[in-house]
Image: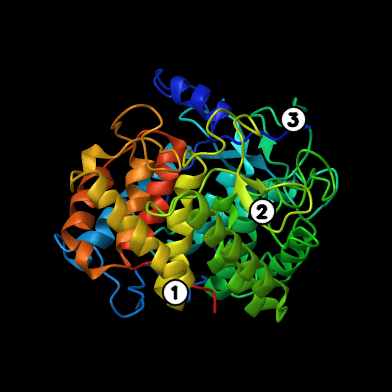
Amino acid sequence: MTRFSVTSSVLVALLFAQCLPVANVNAPRSTAAAPTKDIVSSTGVPLPPNYPYPQHTTYQSGTIQPSRYSQQQLDQHTSTFYFNWINHYLWQKGTEADGHPRYRISSGWSIYDVTVSEGQGYGMLFTAIMAGEDVNARKYFNGLYEFVLDHPTTRSDDMMDWYIPEHEGSDQWGNDSAFDGDCDIAFSLLLAEKQWGNNTRFDYGAEAAKRIAALKTVIGPNSMLPMFGDWVDPYGSPWNEHSSRPSDFMIGHFRAFAIATGDPFWNDVSDACLVVSAQVSQDYSLHPRLLPDFVMEQWAGSTTYKPAYSYFLEGPNDGNYAWNALRYPIRYTGDAIFSGDTRTMQPMRDLSLWIHNQTSGNPYGIAAGYDMNGAPIYGGPSYAPEFSCGFAVAAMTDPNMQLWMDDLYDTFYQSSLGYYSDALVMLSMFLLSGNWWLPY
């Protein structure tokens, strides 16, 4: 079977749906204005966060951030965008038998839109970081995780079914996982452990350890690359352990998993991802330093990789820098500005210089996707914040790109075009404002 990402065929349908009026329904929707504070249930004592927003994290020397606004203004932009995101996409979905609320992230502006594991992961990341600013952050985080726990895959209780209809019943995709959603969920649990400790409703550290262990089963046993999900046979065809998605090369997450578990396995995963990404961009995208939505082995038994062919998994742009690969700069920069690793730092500098020159410094000249040679796949510029925000984040690695970053930031920090776009802008704004931090 195939597992189609919400970022392609499903996303197209969702984007059309989001142009329609939001349904007027009586639903127990979340509200950022609610005064309720989460408490330690056994004692009734309020539980303050250990890393309250804003954090103003110190990044690697030479990292730049938007300069047209003060730190206080950047914090406010990020906070405003977060509450708008929560109010658009976070919905209460009843309660557990013990009375605890369940929450899900909708992939549209309506209560009727589906939930994907990717969205649950984003929601858990965002609420863990915004504790202290959002008085409901821990309640939302726990409720999102309750929903995750209620939807395991057929093969593992510690991975989430990637596609959940609003009615939570059966669907045409079965109960399979998607690597990106589970990876963000596991990382968010490590954040929660640092944010709130483990003496509350969940032992976040123990939950993270279980999910990290489950993620090991969807790493190629020989390739050491993330597979698409638990439905992939490592030795199958056409998808196997050599089929991977560069936007799943979450190097910063893998470093955190290695530290949290003491398991060098995750360092090997990072190394494998970085070797493959360097080889593919060198061989197929030398100057742009782009990566495709999907990669595959050159031929059976090969030790080198190439961009996937059209319709390999999702659609005609599977071998291009399109709606999956656009997350790669966010993931790589999120590692580079902490680790200083040249394997993630230099590609981002090269990518930033290329896109600046490609557009002659005009942020509205960015196209919604490129082939591996750097030509727009749809024939020209097309405003898409999810592409622009990734390039802005990549610019953080190069002090010469200050004006370019500032111009990019102004195009998206007040945007709102839908679930996927808004989620990636939110991730980017945490990094750009200096409020992304690591759980170690």
Closer mark to the observer between disc 1 and disc 3: 1
Q: Residue at x 61, y 36 (%)?
A: 5
Measuring from the top left, give residue 323's x and y in whole percent: 48, 38
Is residue 374 visible to the viewer in this orientation of the structure? yes
Marks 1 and 3, how far apart in space? Answer: 39 Å
Q: Secondary structure at mark 3?
A: loop
The image quadrant that residue 44 belongs to is bottom right
Q: Which residue is mark 2?
A: 182
Marks 2 and 1, how far apart in space? Answer: 27 Å
Measuring from the top left, give residue 162's x and y in whole percent: 68, 41
Q: Residue at x 49, y 57 (%)?
A: 282
Check the image and report above or below for 195 versus 136.
Answer: below
Q: Which residue is mark 1?
A: 342
For residue 436, the mark is none
Q: Earlier in the sequence, mark 2 or mark 3?
A: 3
Q: Specify the farthest residue to the top.
A: 20
Q: Say what amino acid the circle numbered 1 marks.
A: Thr
Q: Earlier in the sequence, mark 2 or mark 1?
A: 2
The quadrant of the rendering that contains the C terminus is bottom right
Q: Secondary structure at mark 2?
A: helix
The quadrant of the rendering that contains the N terminus is top right
Q: Is residue 118 left or right of residue 242?
A: left
Colour pattern of the rendering: rainbow
Measuring from the top left, give residue 155's x and y in whole percent: 85, 47
Between residue 63 and residue 439, name the one nearer to us.
63
Q: Earlier in the sequence, mark 1 or mark 3?
A: 3
